[in-house]
Every structure is written in structure tokens, then in C-alpha cells.
């Protein structure tokens, strides 16, 4: 049974948090489905490798490199979005900016006015994620949010009515934007292009999207790939204030509630990472024989080291588990103390303690156990 160190606990927790973040960002998108498929193929590869199905494991191994390239090409936007999210560490020290709701009352009244007149509309609120990779063909406006402006944009027959409006920093930045459609096959049949576009964008980013149905006069709000129907302007205003000020809402929520929220996927990921760690740690690491050069310190002043025989020793190393890097990848040295040498020939003993190795690696033997050095004394003046 592997021995748990404090570092191992932190190792498991950090990896679990990273995987859960990726899962929470992309759980509603096609990326999570592809990752699940790749996880299944990877599991099959390890099973075939352990059971001796050499041809199948070899084919899967050769396909691995091709699959990685295909993933990078297909999901370049998702990869860019993920790197951007991980790069926002400045928010931990208070350097990040927060997007706030632009006039909740104004937007709520304007949206329900559009719904009453059966005027279709789609409004995107940008939060922390960049949306440039997902919006296309937009017309730049950069105007303050107002009910008359929203009504005029979405009025049937106007040049900008067919598309989405982007609101950022309390301003309407673009109009007539095209959004990516959702690939989900489980959406109800009554959802049209606007609803699929709203869900598609929120599956890929943390944006919030309002949709007004032209046929039914309904107001819906899309967030994290989920669509909710809102019945009153007050309900819409409260939802916008809650969703578009996430930092303030996070501060109001107790820590224990944030930890136990969404408990099932968190527990599953933690157990999965722990099992993988146990499997890798339980596997005995390899024993490698590597040449290790000799280094020296402490040579008395005035003396010169003229010859060393041999210049390196052969060391046998054992890694504690499969998680430790291969001994052949390490840059090791055996350091000897020359403070006690005398002029002429000296024989020094080399022990296991002279070879410094990283944690998880053990020196089990070395050859030879002695080394001869020739030291020349200071030059005597005639």
C-alpha cells in the first residue's frame, strides 16, 4: 500500500480542482463529449497493453499522436478560452475587472416590451470570458443601453434586427452578431435558431444571453447551456443582478455551501484522481543503471587536482513508483570532499550518500566504491 505524504494529498487535490474546473466550463459543450470518448479509448489502450493484446495496443498508441493534432485543430477556440481562463490569476490579488449588469430595470422593461409586441430579440451579456472568437459579422455601435435603442435595433425591417446585440461595460458594443448554434440533440422542437444560438454560446463561454421568442412572446435566459423562462420584469431584473455580479454573490455565499455545491461530480473526480494516483504509485518503479560523473569540493588552497581515476561511477537507482521520472532522465553527480587530501596519490571512498537524488528515488548500489586522485602541491619558489 503506498504511503501518503502531505505533498501527495496536495497533489491529488490540485489535480482534482483543475479537472473539475475544466468539467464545469465545458460540461454542456461538445468538447466534454469528445474528451469522454478519448478517455474511453485511453482506458481500452491500457487494458489491451496489460492483457497482452499487442496489435490493438500498438494501433491505439500510433493513433494517439494523430488524435492530439486533430483535437488541437478542431477545438482551438475552446483551448484558447481555457488558457485565457487559467491566465486570470490577477483576480486572486484583486487585479481583475468585473462586468456589471447594464441597467437591469431598463433592460427588463425593454425586453418584456419586445415580448409583448412579439418582436424577436437576442441580447448577449459578456462576463469574464472573451467572446471575439464566437461572434461574427457584428456591426460596431458602442452606445449606451436604452429601451428605445434596443427596440429600434430589433424592430422588424431594420438593418440590424437579424442577429444578437452584445452588451459589455454597460454599453451596446455590437449588433447583428451571429452566434454559434448548439449541437445538442436534446433541445425541444419549439426552440428556434435564436434559442439554439443562445444555448450554443453559453455552452462555450460564461456569457449570459436573453432571448425573446417572436412566435410565443416568451422571455428566456440562457446560462451555462441551460434555458430558463422568465415571467415578469422583476424576475428578469433579479436574475440579471445575480448573474452579472458573480464576485459579490460569491462573497455572500458561505464557504461550506460553495464546497458542497455540485457535490456528485466533485466527489467522482476526486475519487477518480485518487484511484489513478494509487494505481501509478503502487506500480514499482524501474531499476536503472546510469553513469554518474564525479565532482569535488573542499580542495585545500594552493593544491591542484591533476588526475582522477575513474572520472565517473556506475550507480543503480530505483524509483519508488511510476509517478517518479525515469532515473535515466536525471542529471546526477557524485560529490566528494577533498579537504583531507594530501599531496600525491590519494584513495577516496565513494558511498551511497555522495549521490544526491530527488525525492522518490533511492540509490541501491554503485561501482567502484573507491576512486584515486592525484593532487599536486603548491609550487615552491627557487
Image (cartoon, rainbow, N blue to C red):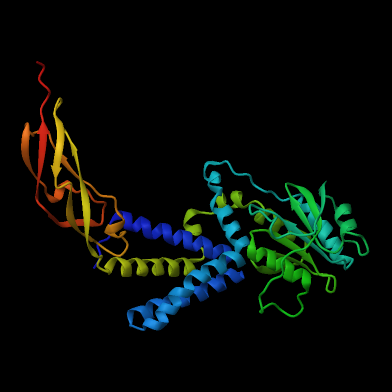
Using the image as rendered, state which of residue 325 and residue 61 is in the foreground: 61
Which residue is painted at 57% across and 41% down in the image? 95
In the rendered structure, the answer to whether residue 345 lies left or right of residue 126 reads left
Using the image as rendered, state which of residue 374 and residue 172 is in the foreground: 374
View extreme (right): residue: 157
Is residue 169 in view from this perspective?
A: yes
View extreme (top): residue: 382
Using the image as rendered, state which of residue 289 and residue 96 is in the foreground: 289
* Percent position of residue 224, x then y: 63, 64
Quarter the C terminus occupies: top left
How many numbered circles does the render carry? 0
Which residue is painted at 66% across and 56% down in the image? 243
* Percent position of residue 294, x then y: 19, 45
Which residue is painted at 41% across and 65% down in the image? 270
Residue 9 image-quadrant placement: bottom left
In the rendered structure, the answer to whether residue 314 lies left or right of residue 169 reads left
In the rendered structure, the answer to whether residue 192 lies left or right of residue 375 reads right
- Is 137 rendered above or below residue 145? below
Quarter the N terminus occupies: bottom left
Is residue 39 in view from this perspective?
A: no
Which residue is painted at 44% across and 79% down in the image? 59
Amino acid at each position: 500500500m503506498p504511503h501518503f505524504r502531505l505533498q501527495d494529498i496536495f497533489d491529488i487535490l490540485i489535480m482534482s480542482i483543475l479537472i473539475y474546473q475544466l468539467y464545469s466550463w465545458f460540461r454542456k459543450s461538445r468538447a466534454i463529449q469528445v474528451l469522454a470518448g478519448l478517455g474511453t479509448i485511453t482506458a481500452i489502450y491500457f487494458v489491451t497493453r496489460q492483457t497482452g493484446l499487442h496489435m490493438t495496443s500498438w494501433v491505439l498508441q500510433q493513433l494517439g499522436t494523430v488524435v492530439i493534432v486533430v483535437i488541437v485543430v478542431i477545438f482551438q477556440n475552446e483551448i484558447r478560452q481555457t488558457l485565457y481562463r487559467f491566465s486570470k490569476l490577477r483576480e486572486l490579488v484583486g487585479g481583475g475587472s468585473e462586468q456589471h449588469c447594464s441597467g437591469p430595470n431598463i433592460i427588463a422593461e425593454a425586453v418584456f416590451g419586445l415580448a409583448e409586441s412579439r418582436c424577436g430579440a437576442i441580447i448577449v451579456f459578456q462576463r469574464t470570458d472573451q467572446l471575439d472568437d464566437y461572434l461574427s459579422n457584428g456591426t460596431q455601435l458602442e452606445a449606451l443601453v436604452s429601451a428605445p435603442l434596443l427596440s429600434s435595433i430589433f424592430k422588424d425591417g431594420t438593418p440590424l434586427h437579424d442577429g444578437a446585440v452584445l452588451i459589455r461595460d454597460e454599453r451596446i458594443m455590437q449588433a447583428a452578431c451571429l452566434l454559434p448554434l448548439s449541437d445538442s440533440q436534446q433541445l425541444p422542437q419549439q426552440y428556434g435558431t435564436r434559442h439554439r444560438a443562445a444555448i450554443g454560446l453559453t455552452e462555450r463561454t460564461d456569457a449570459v444571453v436573453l432571448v425573446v421568442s417572436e412566435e410565443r412572446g416568451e422571455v428566456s435566459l440562457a446560462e451555462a447551456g441551460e434555458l430558463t423562462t422568465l415571467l415578469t420584469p422583476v424576475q428578469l431584473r433579479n436574475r440579471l443582478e445575480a448573474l452579472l455580479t458573480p464576485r459579490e454573490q460569491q462573497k455572500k455565499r458561505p464557504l461550506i455551501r460553495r464546497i458542497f455545491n455540485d457535490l456528485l461530480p466533485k466527489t467522482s473526480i476526486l475519487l477518480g484522481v485518487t484511484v489513478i494516483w494509487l494505481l501509478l504509485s503502487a506500480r514499482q518503479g524501474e531499476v536503472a543503471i546510469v553513469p554518474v560523473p564525479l565532482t569535488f569540493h573542499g580542495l585545500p588552497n594552493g593544491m591542484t587536482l591533476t588526475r582522477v581515476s575513474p572520472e565517473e561511477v556506475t550507480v543503480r537507482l530505483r524509483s519508488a513508483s511510476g509517478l517518479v521520472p525515469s532515473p535515466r532522465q536525471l542529471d546526477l553527480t557524485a560529490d566528494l570532499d577533498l579537504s583531507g587530501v594530501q599531496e600525491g596519490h590519494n584513495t577516496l571512498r565513494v558511498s551511497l550518500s555522495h549521490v544526491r537524488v530527488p525525492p522518490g528515488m533511492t540509490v541501491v548500489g554503485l561501482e567502484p566504491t573507491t576512486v584515486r586522485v592525484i593532487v599536486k602541491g603548491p609550487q615552491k619558489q627557487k
